[in-house]
Amino acid sequence: MHSNAMPSGASGQEQACGRARADDQAEANGQVNGIPEATVARLPVYLRALYGLAERGISTVASEELAAAAGVNSAKLRKDLSHLGSYGIRGVGYDVDYLVYQVSRTLGLTQDWPVVIVGAGNLGRALANYGGFVSRGFTISAMLDSDTAIVGSRIAKLTVRHVDELEAVVARHKVAIGVIATPAGSAQAVCDRLVSAGVTSILNFAPLVLNVPEGVDVRKVDLSIELQILAFHAQRRSAARPESRSAGGNPGTADGRSSPRVTPELAAQG
């Protein structure tokens, strides 16, 4: 009988190397222009960390420091950046400004990308008013909505246009990215029109999985799911936290377990 188990004499180092090779192969299976998709997903995180360093006036950064700021290990960071042709200088590190340029160029951020937001409700308004888009190479070219009470109003220096003009707006502004901030009920129809108009990159905030043809990229942002995940982790931390007990002890429940108690200290921590 064959077994996949390591021989008893195999070292932990061999097992670790095997896992590392498996991870590398998994990343290599999906690549974009020779760069693993997992690396592409981490590049914006590196860029955000680099912007933070630049704002603090730091001109060079060691791989360990940049990795810590990005929340990854330094070996993975060095390998990711090697795909960009950036290896740093031994004993010096990486030039922050040049690395910002390299990452930005790889992500396609050295040119402006026209964006249309469909949905001028609270979320759409917040996105339109976010100043970080312009500084990162994204221009909100237009906002669309179907509500006649909103159409014609001004939001972030833009006049909200009727969604019936979607195709004309995409053509006029050469829109590259569509943002869907509509209710779930209309999101698929909006997506279909964006795709038919030639938009192949879509950021979806609607609580719905969109069906798109091959060649169209969709990134989904579901704020409620993110909050639920945070609630899960908060609950686990709360359950693992030692309870503060008074001198008389904490009364238990009927099944013998101690009942949770909120102390003033914990309440103050939120």
Image (spheres, grey):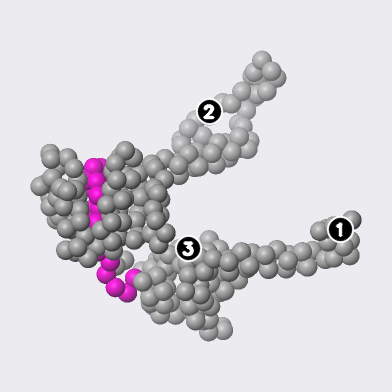
Query: Rounded to the nearest whole Å, what is the CA distance between mark 3 and mark 1?
Result: 38 Å
Depicted 162 relative to depicted 269: above or below = below
Provide residue 106's location: percent of width, then percent of height.
Answer: 41, 74
Depicted 182 relative to depicted 79: above or below = above
Q: Residue at x 35, y 47 (%)?
A: 205
Residue position for label 2: 262
Residue at the far left: name it: 152
On residue 41, the disc is 3
Three-letter amino acid code of the residue under disc 2: Val
Name which of mark 3 and mark 1 comes first in the sequence.
1
Residue position for label 1: 2
Q: Residue at x 60, y 31 (%)?
A: 244
Provide residue 146's location: percent of width, then percent of height.
Answer: 18, 42
* Residue interval drawn in magenta: 109-131
Name which of mark 3 and mark 2 comes first in the sequence.
3
Say which of marks 1 and 2 sits in front: 1
Say which of marks 3 and 2 sits in front: 3
- The N terminus - image quarter: bottom right
